[in-house]
Amino acid sequence: MPKDTLPGLTACNYAMLRRATRKLGQFYDDVQAPSGLKATQQGLLYQIHIGDEPAMGAIAAALVMDLSALGHTLKPLIRDGFVETFADPDDRRIKRVRLTQQGRTKLDEAMKLWQTAQQRFEDVVGKEKAERLRAVLDDISALDFDLPPAT
Amino acid sequence: MPKDTLPGLTACNYAMLRRATRKLGQFYDDVQAPSGLKATQQGLLYQIHIGDEPAMGAIAAALVMDLSALGHTLKPLIRDGFVETFADPDDRRIKRVRLTQQGRTKLDEAMKLWQTAQQRFEDVVGKEKAERLRAVLDDISALDFDLPPAT
DNA sequence: TTGATTTAGTGGCATATACCACTTTCGACG
DNA sequence: CGTCGAAAGTGGTATATGCCACTAAATCAA
C-alpha cells in the first residue's frame, strides 16, 4: 500500500480520543492554573466531594481508573493538605477519603475557573454538541469491550 | 447547595474525555499487548510512518502534543531500536525521525492487533456512532479555545 | 557584520496512569 | 477454630505528558 493513500491517524478511535484529551487538557489546565490545581486534580477533588467519604476502590471504579493509579494521584493532594484518608472502622482493609476544609475551599476556588473553561468550551463547540459528546463518552466508559474468549 | 443535588462528574467535558480515554486505553493496550507495544506507541510509530521523515515539531503539531513530551515518549522507542533520528542537513536545528526496519516490522505486527481492537470497538459502539465520535474529536483538536484577551 | 529575536530541541521536574508482586484483612468452610 | 481464597491497598517500575529554563542555530535589523 503506497504511503500516500494510508489513512491518517484519524481512523483510530483511541488516538483521536487521546489527541482531543491533550487539547482540552492544555485548555482546562491553562484556565484553572490560577487556582494551583490541575484540571485532573480538580476533577478528583470533585469526585471525592460528591461522594460520602468514598473508599479508594469506589473512587477508582467511578473514574474507571486503576486503583494504584488513584493512590499515586492522591499523594500530591494529601501532601498539600487538600485531602485526608482514614481506615473504615468496620473493615480495616478499606481506606476512605475526604476533603479537608482547605480542600473544600480550594475546590470552590477551582470550580469558578472550571465554569469559565466549561462555558468557553460550550461556546466554541456548541451546547448541544458538547452534551451529545459527553453522553457518548459516558456510554463508552460503561461498556464492556472484552473480546469473547475463543472457546 | 446540598450535596445530593450536585451534578456528577459527567458534566465536565474534560473529565468525560479522560475517563473514556482511560477505558479505551485499557482495552486497546490489552489487545495490543502481544506485540509488546502500548497503543500510544503504536500510534506514534504510525504517525511517523505516514510522514516523510517528519521533524519532531511536525509530529508534535500533528498530535497536538507538547514538543518535549514527544521527545520523552520517543526515548523508549529509540532505545528499543524502532525509531531513529537524524539532523536535517539544511537546518541543523531540525531533528527528523524515521522508523528503522525493525520498527516497520513491529508496526505491521501491532497494526494487525489494532484492527482487532478497532473492529471490536465499532461492533460494540456502532460504526456510524464511532465515525461521528472521531469526527467530533478531530474537530475539537483543531479548534482554538483561547479566551479573548480582556482588552 | 553583528547584536537581538525567533525557532527547534533537550533536560529536569512533576503529575497521570498502568501493571505486577506483595501484605493485610475478611469471610467462608471443613 | 484454623486454613484458604477473595478483596483492598501499597510500592516499585515504566510510560505518557506538560511546563520551564536553557542551548544551539537560523533570521532579521541596523
Image: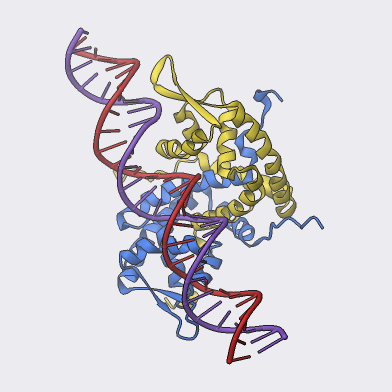
Chain colours: A yellow, B blue, C red, D purple
Quadrant (top left/top right/bottom left/bottom right) for the C terminus of chain B: bottom right
Q: Give coordinates of residue B125: x percent, y percent.
A: 52, 48
Relative side of A80 to B106, left or right: right
* Depicted B107 relative to depicted A139: above or below: below
Quadrant (top left/top right/bottom left/bottom right) for the N terminus of chain B: top right
Q: Quadrant of residue B144?
A: bottom right
Q: Give coordinates of residue A140: x percent, y percent.
A: 53, 44
* Depicted B113 relative to depicted B58: above or below: above
Residue A114 visible at all: yes
Q: Give coordinates of residue A44: x percent, y percent.
A: 55, 37
What residue is rendered at 56% in x and 52% in y? A21
What residue is rendered at 63% in x and 49% in y? A28
The residue furthest right is: B151
Q: Nearer the viewer, residue A76 or B72?
A: A76
Q: Nearer the viewer, residue B117 or A110?
A: A110
What residue is rendered at 35% in x and 71% in y? B104
Relative side of B74 to A77, left or right: left
Q: Nearer the viewer, residue A149 or A7?
A: A7
Q: Quadrant of residue A93?
A: top left
What residue is rendered at 51% in x and 27% in y? A84
Relative side of A91 to A80, left or right: left
Q: Give coordinates of residue B82: x percent, y percent.
A: 33, 68
Residue A64 visible at all: no
Q: How many callouts does the rendering have?
A: 0
